[in-house]
Image: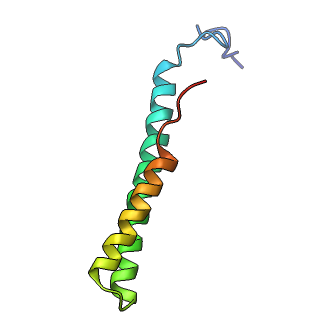
Amino acid sequence: MADHHESSDYVHGEMDIRQHEATYHLFNGLTKWISLHLAVLLVFLVILTCTKLGFIAAFVAAAVVTVAGFFFLKKKPAH
């Protein structure tokens, strides 16, 4: 059998991974912000349709979740 390591130019630990890191950070960022949007939508729709509180209460609850989520999920300053 042929040894695959002899024909490869790959050297462990020398690959440029900046694009991989950028994709990883983009995916994580999109995941957390889309999750916040879905949580806000879910809170709004549940309060609107499953309770008798009405539109104003649903909107206020969704706004509270939005503001709290923004402050919890925003990027923290580097040390």
Say whether residue 59 is left or right of residue 68: left
Q: Is residue 61 above or below residue 28?
A: below
Where residue 21 sits: x, y (%)?
51, 26
Q: Residue furthest bottom?
A: 52
In the rendered structure, the answer to whether residue 13 lies left or right of residue 31 reads right
Q: Quadrant of the N terminus?
A: top right
In the image, 38 versus 14, the foreground residue is 38
Query: Which residue is depicted at the point 41% across and 72% down?
Result: 43
Name the residue at 49% across, 19% down.
18
Identify the colour scheme used: rainbow
Is residue 13 rendered to the left or right of residue 37?
right
Quarter placement of the C terminus: top right
Residue 51 occupies quadrant: bottom left
Location of residue 74 in the rendering, given as x and y in whole percent from the top left corner: 46, 42
Q: Nearer the viewer, residue 76 or 18?
A: 76
Q: Which of the two residues, 45 or 19, is positioned nearer the viewer here?
A: 45
Percent position of residue 77, x then y = 53, 29
Q: Please name the residue shown 41% across and 64% down the image.
A: 64
Query: On screen, 54 above or below 13?
Result: below
Identified at 34% across, 78% down, the residue is 57
Q: Quick check: 28 left or right of 46?
A: right
Query: In the displayed structure, would residue 5 be above or below residue 44?
Result: above
- The x and y percentages for residue 68 are 47, 56
